[in-house]
Image (cartoon, helix red, strand yellow):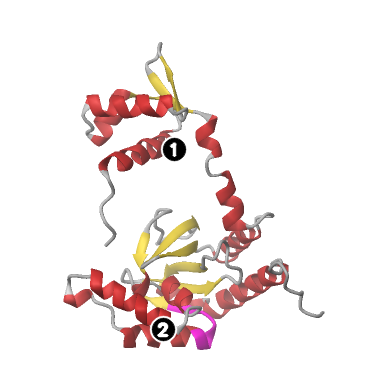
Amino acid sequence: MPEQPIKTSQRVFEILEAFETEQRPMALKDFTRSFGYPPSSASALLKSLVTLGYLDYDRFSRTYMPTMRMASLGNWVQRALFGRNEEVLQLMQRLSEAYGETVTLAAQSDLYVQYVYLIPSRLPIWYAVPIGTIRPIARSGSGWAMLGARSDDEIAELVRRINFHEPDPARKASLEDLMRQVEQGRRDGYVFNKHTLEQGAGGICMVLPERRFGRLFALAVSGPVERLEEKEAEVIAGLRAGIARLEAAAPSPAGEAAPPA
């Protein structure tokens, strides 16, 4: 697993996420009660965020509120993930409307897959994870799909690093088993993982054609395996058609001639 975060940085983001959840001004006591922070530490941290311009403080109500400086921090991320015209987000919305299942966008984060965006399912018995959740790349359908775009040597090096950091022999990755999944994904053009991370849950995954800032992204329609199996061909066709449109719309790299019509 990744290293544990530094306590101060963890508390900063817990405070920011609390504002996102509550969507109201919050007092010092809200954080000490919710997270068990020592009052002196929480007060010092909140005052620091005020000094930096990310929170404001109302002396009369004794509450803190995020400023627009906070709101503007991630504006560029949406364009980076979804494209200037949000083509990827539009595709995710179409897939959600068509199939009703959870639709996820994941990126490789070193030895892990990280979910950077998702649209939750509208159907019963649905499966979803919070944005930002990480999974081991060698045990994730989105991970297998992304690894299919890597060379065999790169995959072997990644497995070596995974096993170096994994103290439990039972959880070490098998290069042979991983390559079997990767090769099947390369042949099929998609990965359908079943019961991989949670019994009964699965996902149909494909890699996006455009690398944004050099990063690979995978799109997946996820839900109960039984339900996905019933509409497997339809979901695959929908993913392929949508990704083909993304590929056709993607700008050519600088200096590279566009393909002939």
Q: Quadrant of the C terminus?
A: bottom right
How many numbered badges does the structure rendering display?
2
Q: Image point 28% across, 78% down: which residue?
A: 173
Please tell me the numbered disc located at residue 153. Answer: 2
Taking the magenta stretch, the answer to whether it contains residue 2 is no
Give the image location of residue 250, x and y in percent: 69, 67
Q: Earlier in the sequence, mark 2 or mark 1?
A: 1
Q: Image point 24% across, 73% down: which residue?
A: 164
Q: Is residue 202 above or below residue 109?
A: below
Q: Image point 36% across, 75% down: which residue?
A: 158
Give the image location of residue 129, x and y in percent: 39, 57
Per the rendered image, the range of residues in magenta is 186-192
Give the image location of residue 117, x and y in percent: 49, 56
* 248 sits left or right of 92 in the view: right
Residue 132 picture quarter: bottom left
Residue 7 picture quarter: top left
Crowd band around label 2 with a 10 angstrom C-alpha radius: few (<14), some (14–19), many (20+): few
Q: Amino acid at mark 1?
A: Glu
* 80 sits left or right of 105 in the view: right
Judged by depth in the image, the label closer to the viewer, 2 or 1, is: 2
Taking the magenta stretch, the answer to whether it contains residue 187 is yes
Q: Is residue 196 above or below residue 151?
A: above
Please tell me the numbered disc located at residue 142. Answer: none
* Label 2 secondary element: helix
Q: Amino acid at mark 2?
A: Asp
Q: Is residue 33 above or below residue 242?
A: above
On the image, numbered disc 1 is attached to which residue?
20
Give the image location of residue 85, x and y in percent: 69, 55
**Residue 119 visible in the snapshot:** no
Q: Is residue 55 above or below residue 86?
A: above
